[in-house]
């Protein structure tokens, strides 16, 4: 019997070292750390703090969506339901229960996870386009539910009055009205989510998700219960998007009804594809491109979505791996 | 006398009005290397798919080690000790070859663990490397599965099937589409694997299984035509009529 510890070392060694090899190796092994460091200086790179917060929150939303789409291979058109459940969940806890900040975030995430369990149980048996359609239909059900539960959710006018002036974190009272402090409060939650996501992707379960994306039949033949792995992926994805929603609610201090509308689900798909599906940081890059584009172009023209559409088509045609995916491919070939 | 490992009783599979498998009762003994043969459309693949848990039989029973397993989901078959390789190469195309086998091995250790980093499960990596060594594909461990040659992909698939440490290995046309050299290498591999476990293979090429297997099961039009040693099958009048009469 040969020593397989030795084999493992030779298996790990990179074949052709290039200029970018050390950088790539570092980024690969410290994904979460690199992303968190970058996001900690991010507000100083943006024209104003509110845009930085928006990118932070929607980056997390796209990231959660990517867990299901990019890593498990399931294209959902209903993720607005989780963003919405997180936002309304957190908002209602503050407005109706007058509960503190942390409880509101926990409430939002829990509600989103609960909605994900129900939607997941009803949809994961279907595949491909049928899965997309079922998730779209179910998310529209959630939309009408929220639209009609006016006394709880504010209905058409959205949920108003989510006023938070100070946030108690680790015994320190932080002024939430200060834009830069607000960014860093939200950043703490996004950083935790990034770290948790990196652990999920590096775990045995992360490998099962990739196996399902690659070949569902083979994954089952290996002895994996594909249905329960899919459901867990669906619920985790929903919980990440729910956290994004909860943070969005406390940032805006109002939840517009559009948050749960199906167009918001489409935004997750666009951001994910722009940045690079199945890459760790791609969805963030996609969210940044999308929102910066929107921010700059809405000042010039009301038809900004036309130009965004052109950008999207070009990206899908020439960078099918997305901006971030293509960049990491390019550096790994150097 | 060896004990029966897998037993079918009146196994029937219908697709609409078409009867693909008609009342097949046959037993497979522990430790044997058996082959299911038959002309095109004899129901070989359907039989294989029912035995390996791809779909449940319409009627009849399937028992493994005395336990009724008909109708269990695919992953339950694997967990109770039945593994298979597919007729059409069925791997994780965009993942490295080693990761393909590692994922298959991992199913024995950790399935829904979302916390421990997978590189810390070193015994999984070691087992995967050992399986690749045994099937002769360790030199290609770092290559993407889809970039391997056809014969190497088939060997990879067998390494993945062996990962669950099965007591019964089912192989569906393991040499389909292979060159003569690849076929010979595959046959050697199967003979080697057969020393330690029960193997049932479904094969179209009659000549190949004649020299390799101890027992042959001949299907025709979904029915059991004959069971016996290669010599008995060669001498069987109805097998000669339906099978050997054609130039195979």
Image (cartoon, rainbow, N blue to C red):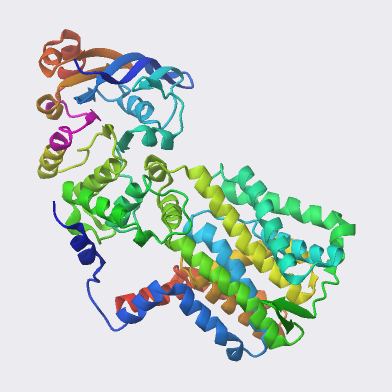
**Can you give x and y, in whole percent of width and height, for residue B222 in the image?**
34, 17
Determine whether, in the image, residue A116 is placed left or right of residue A34: right
Q: Judge whether residue B200 is colored magenta.
A: yes
Instruction: Evaluate whether residue A334 shows in this view.
Output: yes
**Can you give x and y, in whole percent of width and height, for residue A111 in the image?**
71, 56
Residue at 51% of width from left, 83% of height from top?
A38
Residue in the foreground of this view, choosing between A171 and A42: A171
Determine whether, in the image, residue B97 is placed left or right of residue B1: right
Q: Is residue B102 above or below residue A102?
A: above
Residue in the foreground of this view, choosing between A231 and B173: A231
**Can you give x and y, in whole percent of width and height, for residue B33 in the image?**
19, 26
Q: Is residue A60 above or below residue B181?
A: below
Q: Is residue A334 above or below residue B151?
A: below
What is the tally of numbered marks visible in this picture? 0
Residue at 56% of width from left, 87% of height from top?
A41
Q: Kindly indicate the quadrant of the structure image that contains residue A221.
A: top left
- Residues shaded magenta: B190-207
Determine whether, in the image, residue B180 is placed left or right of residue A48: left
**Can you give x and y, in whole percent of width and height, for residue B78 in the image?**
37, 36
Furthest toward the front, the residue is A171
Q: Judge whether residue A53 is colored magenta.
A: no
Furthest toward the top, the residue is B237
Q: Kindly indicate the quadrant of the structure image that contains residue A246.
A: bottom right
Instruction: Identify the image quadrant of the C terminus of chain A.
Output: bottom left
Instruction: Evaluate whether residue A297 shows in this view.
Output: no
Residue at 47% of width from left, 18% of height from top?
B17
Residue in the foreground of this view, choosing between A208 and A327: A208
Q: Kindly indicate the quadrant of the structure image that contains residue A42.
A: bottom right
């Amino acid at each position: 019997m040969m020593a397989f510890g030795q084999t493992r070392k030779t298996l790990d060694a990179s074949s052709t070292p290039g200029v970018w090899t050390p950088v790539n190796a570092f980024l690969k092994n410290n994904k979460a750390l690199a992303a968190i460091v970058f996001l900690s200086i991010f507000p100083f790179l943006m024209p104003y703090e509110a845009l930085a917060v928006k990118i932070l929150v929607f980056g997390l939303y796209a990231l959660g969506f990517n867990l299901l789409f990019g890593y498990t291979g399931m294209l959902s058109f209903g993720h607005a339901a989780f963003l919405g459940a997180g936002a309304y969940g957190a908002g209602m806890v503050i407005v109706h229960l007058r509960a503190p900040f942390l409880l509101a975030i926990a409430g939002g995430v829990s509600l989103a996870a609960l909605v994900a369990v129900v939607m997941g149980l009803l949809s994961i048996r279907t595949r491909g386009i049928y899965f997309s359609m079922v998730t779209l239909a179910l998310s529209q059900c959630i939309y009408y539910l929220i639209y009609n539960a006016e006394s709880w959710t504010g209905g058409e006018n959205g949920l108003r009055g989510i006023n938070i002036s100070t946030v108690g974190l680790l015994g320190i009272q932080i002024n939430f009205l200060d834009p830069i402090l607000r960014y860093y409060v939200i950043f703490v939650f996004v950083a935790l989510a990034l770290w948790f996501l990196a652990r999920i992707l590096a775990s045995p379960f992360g490998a099962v998700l990739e196996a399902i994306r690659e070949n569902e039949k083979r994954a089952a033949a290996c002895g994996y219960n594909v249905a329960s792995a899919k459901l867990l992926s669906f619920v985790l994805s929903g919980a990440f998007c729910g956290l994004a929603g909860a943070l969005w609610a406390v940032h805006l201090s109002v939840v517009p009804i559009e948050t749960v509308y199906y167009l918001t689900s489409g935004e997750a798909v666009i951001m994910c594809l722009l940045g690079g599906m199945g890459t760790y940081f791609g969805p963030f890059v996609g969210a940044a491109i999308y929102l910066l584009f929107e921010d700059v172009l809405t000042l010039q023209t009301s038809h900004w979505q036309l130009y965004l559409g052109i950008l999207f088509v070009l990206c899908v045609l020439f960078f099918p791996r997305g901006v971030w995916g293509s960049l990491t491919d390019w550096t790994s070939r150097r | 006398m060896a004990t029966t490992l897998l037993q079918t009783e009146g196994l029937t599979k219908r697709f609409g009005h078409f009867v693909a498998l008609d009342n097949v009762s046959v037993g497979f003994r522990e430790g044997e290397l058996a082959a299911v043969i038959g002309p095109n459309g004899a129901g070989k693949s359907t039989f294989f798919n029912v035995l390996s848990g791809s779909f449940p039989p319409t009627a009849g029973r399937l028992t493994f080690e005395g336990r009724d397993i008909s109708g269990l989901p695919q992953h339950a078959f694997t967990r109770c000790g039945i593994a298979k390789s597919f007729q059409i190469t069925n791997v994780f195309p965009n993942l490295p070859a080693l990761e393909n086998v590692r994922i298959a091995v991992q199913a024995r250790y950790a399935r829904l663990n979302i916390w421990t980093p997978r590189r810390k499960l070193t015994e999984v990596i070691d087992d995967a490397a050992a399986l690749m060594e045994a099937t002769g594909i360790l030199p290609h461990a770092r290559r993407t599965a889809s970039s391997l040659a056809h014969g190497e992909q088939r060997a990879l698939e067998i390494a993945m099937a062996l990962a669950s440490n099965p007591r019964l290995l089912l192989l569906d046309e393991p040499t389909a589409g292979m060159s003569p050299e690849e076929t010979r290498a595959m046959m050697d591999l199967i003979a080697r694997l057969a020393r330690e476990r029960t193997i049932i293979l479904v094969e179209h090429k009659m000549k190949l299984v004649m020299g390799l297997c101890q027992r042959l099961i001949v299907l025709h039009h979904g029915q059991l035509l004959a069971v016996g040693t290669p010599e008995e099958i060669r001498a069987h009048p109805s097998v000669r009529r339906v099978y050997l009469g054609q130039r195979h």
